[in-house]
Image: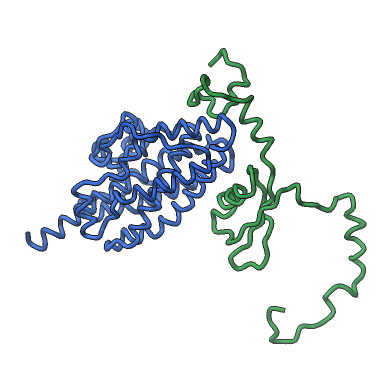
Chain colours: A green, B blue
């Protein structure tokens, strides 16, 4: 083992369980694989929830495996009953630089805020 | 034979049967758990851990039931940690070393297909406890099967290296597959009594499903060769001793200890 280069040790199972001769192999499979697997954002809907909530992200080679990985990582403790996965590159997000122009103007337009009526007694779940 | 003798035989047969199923799950749980903190990806680490835990849960239920039926005061821990090699009744397929990821996927594919057919049939057992255990387990193994099939297709129909490793795994496993479908006098008695699921007719649907997945994965089941057997009688490969040494060491060093 001492003679081998660092590159060989990167192969999966480089502790000797993997045959290093006679197997057709490309360069550093572990390193190459991680950079090829896309990132997916995961949304879970709880049993009593109405909408899917973002819970985190994971890597997977494709959409089907992403759903299964999400099941393993994000529903272990009965967090939800429905999973959405979206490839991270498909998401478009607002930029923090635009935060002021995007969100501040709404703050002082109080006529849009739903806070000017009193809820009658006995009305629930409004 | 008096009625009491007949039911005693069914009961003691069921102890052995539950141990066979439980030991299958326990030994494979142990092998699968060897991937924890050593898996190729973080997501797969958790997935394999979940699968191992599912199998361990099945083992706990089955061993506990066997101990109760036996009535000799042995609980699940006594059976798991204080039996010797010759008393374990798992199929030899389950005790083979962890291998590489290709081998693991190949074994998971074959064994989860087998467990799916087995537990599906066992749900209608006249033994209420076995039927209940099977009803819960069948959902778990359906996911194991799904997981293994997805990986088998991606690895088999992947790079030349992944294809080679998965095929090598199948080749290594094949001599141990037939044992899953063997029967003996005890099994036949229990099938007759409506307690056990008959393993012999299970071979066709299990291998058909395995072949279906392998076809999509551009892999092939090896041709007939040597068939190893003996696990159901306590005869094991040289790997079983090492597995038990690791699994039982702590409990045997501190007998009677509790958390």
Q: Among all residues in the image, which is located at the extreme top?
A: A3
On-image quarter of the N terminus of chain B: bottom left
Q: Nearer the viewer, residue B246 or B203?
A: B203
In the rendered structure, the answer to whether residue A22 lies left or right of residue A45 reads: left
Q: Is residue B180 above or below residue B134?
A: above
Q: Is residue B171 above or below residue A50?
A: above
Horizontal and vertical percent for residue A29? 61, 29
Residue at 91% x, 56% y is A100
Q: Among all residues in the image, which is located at the extreme left?
A: B1
Residue at 62% x, 25% y is A26
Residue at 43% x, 39% y is B107
Residue at 20% x, 51% y is B72
Quarter holding residue A62: top right
Q: Nearer the viewer, residue B135 or B210?
A: B210
Horizontal and vertical percent for residue A33? 64, 34
In the rendered structure, the answer to whether residue B5 lies left or right of residue A108 reads: left
In the rendered structure, the answer to whether residue A14 lies left or right of residue B133 reads: right
Quarter holding residue A61: top right
Horizontal and vertical percent for residue B126? 27, 63
Report the number of numbered marks.
Answer: 0
Horizontal and vertical percent for residue B152? 52, 41
């Amino acid at each position: 083992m001492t003679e081998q280069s660092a590159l060989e040790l990167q192969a999966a199972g480089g502790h000797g369980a993997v045959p290093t001769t006679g197997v057709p192999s490309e360069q550093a499979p572990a390193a190459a694989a991680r950079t090829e697997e896309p990132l997916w954002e995961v949304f879970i809907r709880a049993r009593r929830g109405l909408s899917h909530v973002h819970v985190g992200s994971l890597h997977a080679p494709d959409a089907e495996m992403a759903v299964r990985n999400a099941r393993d990582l994000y529903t272990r403790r009965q967090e939800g009953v429905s999973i959405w996965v979206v490839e991270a590159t498909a998401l478009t997000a607002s930029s923090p630089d635009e935060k002021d122009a995007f969100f501040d103007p709404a703050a002082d337009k109080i006529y849009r805020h739903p806070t000017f009526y009193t809820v009658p007694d006995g009305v629930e779940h409004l | 034979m008096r009625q009491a003798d007949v039911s005693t035989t069914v009961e003691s047969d069921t102890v052995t049967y539950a141990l066979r199923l439980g030991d299958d799950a326990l030994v494979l749980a142990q092998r699968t758990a060897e991937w924890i903190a050593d898996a190729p990806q973080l997501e797969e680490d958790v997935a394999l851990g979940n699968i191992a835990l599912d199998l361990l849960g099945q083992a706990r239920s089955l061993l506990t039931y066997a101990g109760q039926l036996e009535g000799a005061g042995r609980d699940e821990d006594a059976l798991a940690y204080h039996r010797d090699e010759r008393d374990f009744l798992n199929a030899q397929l389950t005790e083979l070393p962890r291998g590489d990821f290709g081998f693991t996927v190949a074994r998971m594919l074959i064994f989860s297909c087998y467990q799916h057919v087995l537990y599906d049939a066992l749900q209608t057992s006249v033994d209420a406890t076995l039927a209940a255990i099977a009803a819960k387990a069948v959902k778990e193994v359906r996911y194991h099967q799904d997981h293994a099939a997805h990986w088998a297709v991606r690895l088999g129909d992947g790079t030349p290296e992944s294809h080679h490793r998965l095929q090598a795994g199948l080749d290594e496993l094949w001599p141990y597959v037939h044992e899953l479908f063997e029967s003996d006098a005890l099994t036949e008695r229990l099938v007759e009594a409506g307690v056990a699921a008959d393993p012999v007719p299970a071979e066709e649907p299990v291998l058909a499903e395995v072949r279906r997945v392998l076809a999509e994965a551009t892999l092939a089941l090896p041709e007939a060769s040597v068939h190893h057997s003996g696990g159901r009688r306590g005869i094991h490969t040289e790997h079983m001793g090492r597995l038990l040494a690791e699994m039982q060491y702590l409990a045997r060093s501190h007998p009677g200890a509790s958390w």
